[in-house]
Image (spheres, helix red, strand yellow):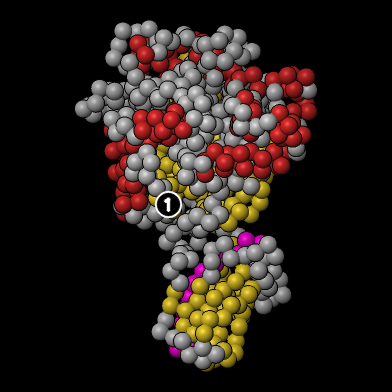
Amino acid sequence: MNPRRVGPGAAFGAAFVFLASMPSMAAFPNGIATGDVSTNSAVVIARSDVPGIVTIEYGFDSQEEHVLGSFQVPVTDPAIPAKGELTGLLGSTAYWVRATDESGASALGRFRTLLHFGIPSTFRFGVTGDWRGELAPYPAVANMPERDLDLLIKLGDTIYADYPTPDLPLPQAETLEEYRIKHNEVYSERYGRNVWAEVQANVAVLATIDDHEVTNDFAGGADPTTDDRFDDDVPFINETTLFANGLQAFHDYNPIREEYYEETGDPRTSGKRKLYRERTAGKLAAFFLLDARSFRDLELPAVENPLDPQQIGAFLVASFDPSRTMLADQQIEDLKADLLEAQSNGVTWKFVVVPEPIQNLGVIGASDRFEGYAAERTELISFIETNGIENVVWITADIHGTLVNNLTYSTGPFDAQIPTSMWEISTGSVAFDAPFGPTVALLAFQFGLLSQAEYDVYLSLPRQLKDEFIRQLTDIQVTSQGYDPLGLTGSEVPAQLLEGSYAPTHTFGWTEFEIDPLDRSLLVTTYGIDAYTQDELDADPDGVLSRVPEVVSKFLVIPQETVSASEPASAPRLSIHGSVSSADSDGISKLHLSLAESGQSTVEIYDVRGAHVASLFRGSLVAGTHVLEWDGAMDSGRQAPPGLYLIKASMGRETATTKLIRVR
């Protein structure tokens, strides 16, 4: 078992189930939430229905009766959550936090500060995005509390301000009050359940916006005259009243600091709100949370006919305009500097977290993604590659389905794709009707890519086969433009699919990332429930709320510095190596042992802690290459569990070592 917690507040789990099942107090209808967490601080919010003083107290989780500190927040408008910051905290430590209002009602939460350097502990975090108010209370994330997360990242579209919902049946929120109604709606009880209150009572969050916190597909760095939804006479959309109202409500209802850029030399960022965040969890992980909306240039016109080569070519050329930006110079400079620092500090995994996908998915919908800002995309990816920044993972959302793929890039609109060791996973949605799969199938039918008969076949399939149908349909789109098909199989990423698929696109859900502190392997698990509509929810709320998240995708990735299948360990007279994805469908791992001369040889298997697992071979071998097979049998008679194993080959005094993954 991996070490999990250290520090004075290590006893986190005892009250865990209680908090996960406890209904929120009426006076705190959104519960309590902590966020913007670091190794020594966290922000707390709690909205009371009662005007007056809200008292925030906190202490070590293992000492619930002992109050380490407290502060008070006056509440004059019950629509605005009380907010404050806890400072001087210990890293890698579990805390409780409690809000109490003047009526005596209280809300209790728990969270952990981020790992210090050198702390040996498993790190587990979740990511999701995209939930609409009429689909509350979100059973797709109901298993989050039991997963004992260290961190949760809410990756944009946390409200849909431009969709009518039960609490605000208007086509677009406009006033600050209306935006607050939207946020309150998604974090409140519905049908007797408040899942988000349960989740946020048990884990600290980071959060950023996408577009629907303001309005659909807005471009914050564009002139307001280019978008008739904004009528202020100001240089940029990010200076308009609608943008300001949306961002203020987002900050009100999320436990994050209100930060601003100083003078940057660029009017689109100088003095503007700063949502970019960099956080580290020891040497296991670094996070770079990006704002892809507030500063971007106007999107390119959409390709109207995805079957027209001329339209496709014109779009690709326009997307490589180096003057166009999605992130703005200051945010790009911050990201580059922080990536370099993480690599220099020996941090294993670097997670770039941004709402818009950076993987190439083809021209349909590309204007909104990094594909519409291809020059900047190439700049970022080539910078990471040129500087040898290892183990970079892009985590995205927005498309309402999970797609996993390795990243390639090109230096021009029609140049060959250059492979990289980076990869991306899109996650979510928590609840957006309809998900990626049905949406793509319908679009393909409308564009003539699917016949009526083919579309009817798709509609008749069970969920897993629908996923496969959409994967193949997406692959046709991406490979036609010279991009790699979905998935990590055959790429430069040392990964192995363990369960489900690399493209579950018909569920509502979220994705969990777990880093092993010893071998630094990354286990990625996506949970999902069958998607539902508002009509289905309203007609049978108990039935929808009884849906339990299940694993729809699980895969394991080994960090680059841990193992390289292309560089086997070697010695003068022998070498041994095994592919990272070396287990076949029967669970047989294959090792290749090369001998320069005949002699007595041994091959031993150890786990990552150095404990002996099995003697694979002991005896005499002739010169040449030998293929050895391991079925997972241990000398103890048991089967070895999935994970990373060390292989040691010996001939006389010479040894060679390598590593492999056992996947089943």
Q: Position of residue 59 (x, y in %)?
A: 50, 38
Q: Estimate the x, y position of residue 522 in percent, counting from the top left.
A: 53, 53
Q: Main secondary structure of the magenta part?
A: strand
Task: Say whether residue 146 is left or right of residue 4.
Answer: right
85 left or right of 500 in image: left
Query: Looking at the picture, does residue 653 appear above or below residue 5?
Result: below
Query: Please, what secondary structure does the residue beneath circle 1 have?
Result: strand
Residue at position x 36%, y 33% in the image: 317
Mark 1 neighbour class, 10 Å CA radius: few under 14, some 14 to 19, many 20 or more: some
Examine the rendered structure and indicate whether residue 444 appears above or below residue 420.
Answer: above
Q: Residue at x 65, y 22 (%)?
A: 135
| Residue 508 seen in the current view | no
**Does the magenta portion include 40?**
no
Quickly name the residue at label 1.
419
Residues drawn in magenta: 650-664
Question: Image quarter for residue 447?
Answer: top right
